[in-house]
Image (cartoon, rainbow, N blue to C red):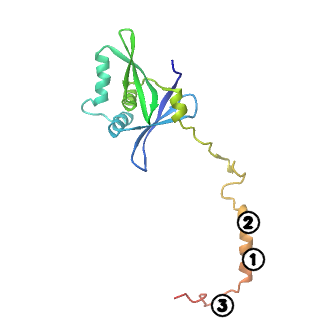
Amino acid sequence: MKKMRECLISSVRVSLINQDRIVVLKDKEQERYLPIWIGLYEFEAITIVLHKIETARPLTHDLMKNLIGTLDARLLSVEITALESDTFYANLVLEQGGTQKRLDCRPSDALALVVRTGVPIFVDEDVLDRAGVIPEVEIHVEEGVSEANGEAPGDLSVFEEFFNKLDNEDKDQPKPESGEDGPDPVP
């Protein structure tokens, strides 16, 4: 059995560069994220639920959820099981009549069911290791002191030598007589 890690939906995003839709999963135990590109229709199916938008009729994923219940089955969880040639693979883990079954599906469809049912998401650890992203450590500014250089934000002391040099150069320059506007403009 593969080692699986529980993840949560962290965000659903639209790329500003090319308008791709992305669901970002977050490892429940650590700061590791898994971006999964999805189609426009699955993006809408997920965001409709996240934004609590009601529809007049059941959408495809609502139908799937209702169908599972009508067949006396229960969705237990969703598994992201593999990544091959830039394509993610997933399973719906169902229970029916005391028997557990796995049904192959696209991750985008599985995640659209997750937002409707609240079941957990499990991701194969190998997939997280290969495609997961760990954010870089950020520099935090606390109590007016930056950890990066120990100076208060807005502190211009690093420019003190530069300002002094400008002041000294300014003193050495002749000042224009009153009424003069300075040198003639270059045509």
Please report whichever mark, 3 or 2, sits nearer to the chain's N-terminal start: 2
Q: Position of residue 161 (x, y in %)?
A: 75, 67
What secondary structure is marked by label 2?
A: helix
Task: Pick whichever, 88 or 5, lies toward us.
Answer: 88
Q: CA distance from mark 2 to mark 1?
A: 12 Å
Q: Position of residue 54 (x, y in %)?
A: 30, 34
Mark 1 packing: few (<14 Cα in 10 Å), some, or many (20+)?
Answer: few
For badge 3, the amino acid type reads Glu
Q: Quadrant of residue 78?
A: top left
Report if the CB atoms under discs 3 and 1 are less than 8 Å apart: no
Residue at screen point 75% across, 77% down: 168
Mark 3 packing: few (<14 Cα in 10 Å), some, or many (20+)?
Answer: few
Q: CA distance from mark 3 to mark 1?
A: 20 Å
Residue under pointer 2: 160
Residue under pointer 1: 168
Residue at screen point 43% across, 42% down: 13
Residue under pointer 3: 177
